[in-house]
Amino acid sequence: MKIAVYGKGGIGKSTTSCNISIALARRGRRILQIGCDPKHDSTFTLTGFLIPTIIDTPQSKDYHYEDVWPEDVIHKGYGGVDRVEAGGPPAGAGCGGYVVGETVKPLKELNAFYEYDIISFDVLGDVVCGGFAAPLNYADYCIIITDNGFDALFAANRIAASVREKAHTHPLRLAGLVGNRTSERDLINKYVEACPMPVLEVLPLVEDIRVSRVKGKTSFEMAECQPNLNFVCDFHSNIADQTLSKPEGIVPREIPDRELFSLLSDFYLNPNSGKREKTQNDQQNTLHDQRDTSLGFTIIRH
């Protein structure tokens, strides 16, 4: 199985990807996580340091490609998760998307690409060009990381458009959204109501999750000394279990940009409309519950 994880830059995508990889490894799967960001920090929380990249390795071998071995580009991390970082050119000096598109080639040449149960591509930011969309050419599923905010959902919608485009020629499906670092999900609900797609999980706003990135540790590793974080690991384990179940997934149909802009901005400009609808629904549910109780039993609605 191959998974491509996308989302707006700074949304906590790499932190979430690493935790999902650990959860999958703890289910007995052999995992390779490929970091597709020129900053080459996707897998930082699995080791606490930046590993050599696909770009760095040939240079260290004086460009004698015949001397490059799998262990030169694939590095072991916490929990037994193997990691690769694509890397990229210096800022302003080349196309990072091209490097991402070319990363799979050396892995295939080293006979390493098909030796894993699951390969996870952690791809930077929004889909901005064909190079950064390249992991979708290999993926069975795309997972979109978002939060309960305008910009992240706008990026999610653009990623959904890329999934739909790639699904024309590849067996790709959107597994669903993962809400990250949010105490509310009302705007996420508003979006998926207009653009139907599964919501795999919504992770709470927990400072320790953000701090784990700075510490270079996954939530699973931190939980070994801080048992109170086990509940955070349960969220990631749930995402892993849903992925392992091989969900049917969907081919999304994104919302046109202007329509989405109006939908999301209206939510902020007219916040009381959503509350009014919720109040009306609550009142209707209360009446139904009272009617059900009068029959001798109560139906509890979730």
Image: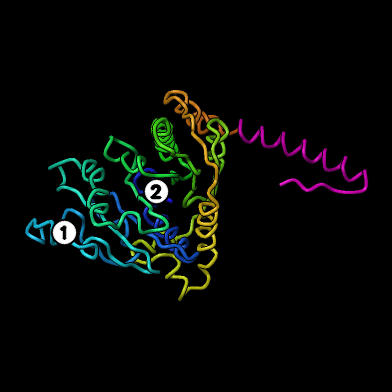
Name the image quarter holding residue 238. bottom right
Q: Residue at x 15, y 41 (%)?
A: 94
CB within 8 Å, label 1 to label 2: no
Q: Quadrant of residue 32 in the image? A: bottom left
The location of residue 228, given as percent across then percent down, is 53, 70
The residue stretch that appears in magenta: 273-302
Residue 248 x %, y %:
55, 42
Please say if 137 is above or below 58: above
Q: Main secondary structure of the magenta part?
A: helix
Mark 1 vs mark 2: in front: 1
Which amino acid type is shown beneath numbered disc 2?
Ile
Within-10-Å neighbours for mark 2: few <14, some 14–19, many 20+: some
Please tell me which residue is depicted at 16% across the width and 47% down the height of the picture: 89
120 above or below 263? below
Q: CA distance from mark 1 to mark 2?
A: 29 Å
Mark seen at residue 57: 1
Determine the residue positioned at 16% across, 59% down. Answer: 57
Check disc 1: other Cα within 10 Å, few if <14, some if 14-19, many if 20+: some
- What label does residue 126 carry, if any? none
Residue 146 in the figure: left or right of residue 96: right
Q: Position of residue 53 (x, y in %)?
A: 21, 57
**Position above or below: 11 against 288:** below
Question: Which mark is first along the chain, 2 or 1?
Answer: 2
Q: Which residue is mark 2?
A: 11
Instruction: Give the image location of residue 212, x and y in percent.
Output: 39, 64
- Residue 261 on the magenta span: no
